[in-house]
Every structure is written in C-alpha cells, then in structure tokens.
Amino acid sequence: QTRNPKVAALKQFFRNSEVDCFGGAEPNINWSAMKRHENPREWFRSENALRVVAAHNTHQNVSTIQQGGAIMACFGEMAKRLVETGKDPNGLGRWAWFKFIGKEQHTTRIVTAYIPCPGPRTGLRTVYAQQQQYWEKKRNYTCPKVLLIQQLTAQLHQWRAAGDRIMLLIDANGDVRTCDLAKRLAETGLEMQEVIQARHHALPTTPSHQSGSKPIDGIFTTPDLPIQKGAL
C-alpha cells in the first residue's frame, strides 16, 4: 500500500464514486526507476478485479521524476472485460490504452493521452524537450506536438476502420472546443466530439486549471459510444 497522500485520496474517490475506469495524464513518474511496491498496480490494489497500464518515456532514465506520461486503471466487472492493453509504440509515454469486448461483442478502446506545450529548451525536464530530442536524433525536426496529433489520430483512424468504438481522455494543453486536435478528431472517419462540453453546452465553461481560462481537458467519443456520466 502506498503512503502517497494523493494516491490515497484518489483511491477514496474511486470507492466513493464507484469508479470503474480511470485515466490520468502527466503522472510525472519514471516507472522503470520505481521500486516494485511503488508500481501503479500496487498503488490501486483493491478487493475488486484490477487492471493497470502506465506509460512513460523509456528513452530517458535520469531519476524517478519524469515529466509527462499516462496511466490508466479499471476495476471490477469492467476489468473482466479488458482483453488488451497498450502504450505509445514509440516508447515516449504519450498515450496508453485499454481494449474491451462487451457482452454483444462490441469492441471499445479507451485511450488516455497528454499533449505537451511548446516552449524554450530546458534540458530534458519538459515533456516537449524530451520528445524533441528523441525525434531530432532520428532527423525529424517536425514540432513534437504536431507529430503527436498526427500519429495519435492515425492510430485512432486505424482502430475505427476496424470497427472499434473509441473514447479519448485527453489533456490537450489547448481549448478542447477549438484546438487542432479537436478539428482532427471531428474529421470524417472519426467524427469524435468532446462530450462534456456537448452535454452541458448551456452551462458556463469551466477552466481545467485554476489559473486558466479555457477547458484543456476533455473526453472525446465516437458517435456510437454515448455517455451517461463522466468527470474531468
């Protein structure tokens, strides 16, 4: 069991709210440097069935603290429906995913992703700088944010073409109503929309950060995956 107060508070929230699936962006942890009892499965261990996937930048191993990454956990009956997990194939920890097969054999993928903010180089501390160094070593000088959006949406299109229903939990670091990612997700073949804003469009917009003015966190789904309840 973890002594981390944030993890303890998160577990209490899971119990009180009967959460069956969780996705978290930017846990800022180098999982390869953590001790066995500090791995995410131990964090969320419970009396219910449990599945966990955690992604980080596998090309950097400086300390236990590493900006960026993604983590997901599912519990109980939902965990029993999980058939596959996965991560960013480039090993940068940009996203992680679960694949479920339901009672009627529908396939659903839930993806958690984090898009970095472009900014000045500060060694390898920022997520943007980590990814920029990785791509430049491969002689690819495209903006890492642009590459992430291109590669993530290409992967979503591939899954969608195979008939999967898709839910994307995202920290977009941009207004989820108008950012480049939102435009790409709305294109033919995906037709994904941000469901919290769509469901509560008559209510005032709530910033995702206390110092911000725009919603940068979002839940995007394909049209065949209606949402009943959700929280950011």
Image: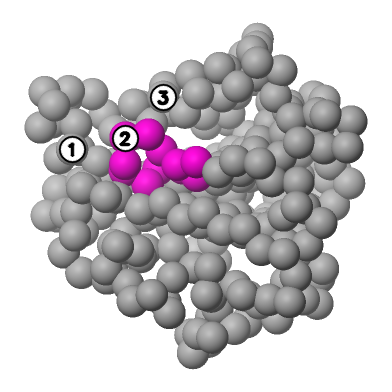
Could you say where residue 111 lies in the image, as x and y percent from the top left? 58, 41
Based on the displayed image, in which of its 4 quarters is residue 74 positioned? Answer: bottom right
Ranked by sequence position, the earlier of labels 2 and 1 is 2
Marks 3 & 2, CB-CB < 8 Å contact: yes
Query: Along the polypeptide, which appears first: circle 3 or circle 1?
Result: 1
Q: Mark 1 points at which residue?
A: 134
Please name the amino acid that badge 1 sits on.
Answer: Tyr
Q: Which of marks 3 and 2 is nearer the N terminus?
A: 2
Compare residues 17 and 209 and report the one nearer the observer: 17
Where does label 3 land, which residue?
151
Q: Do the residues labelled 2 and 1 touch (CB within 8 Å)?
A: yes
Residue under label 2, please give it: 90
Q: What element carries label 3?
A: helix
Mark 3 or 2, closer to the camera:
2
Rendering coords of residue 205 (x, y %) = 71, 50
Question: Which residue does the image show at 35% across and 53% down from the upper left?
Answer: 56
Label 3 and label 1: CA atoms lie apart by: 15 Å
Decide: is 88 above or below 186: below
Residue 91 included in the magenta stretch of the image: yes
Q: Which amino acid does label 2 sit on?
A: Asn
What amino acid type is highlighted by mark number 3? Gln
Is the magenta region chiefly helix, strand or loop? loop
Q: Which residue is drawn at 62% across and 58% down?
A: 51
Where does residue 66 sit, x and y in percent of width and height?
28, 62
How much space separates mark 3 and mark 2, taking CA atoms?
Answer: 10 Å
Magenta part of the chain: 86-96
- Left or right: where 27 falls relative to 210: left
Residue 172, can we see it? no
Q: Which of marks 2 and 1 is in front?
A: 2
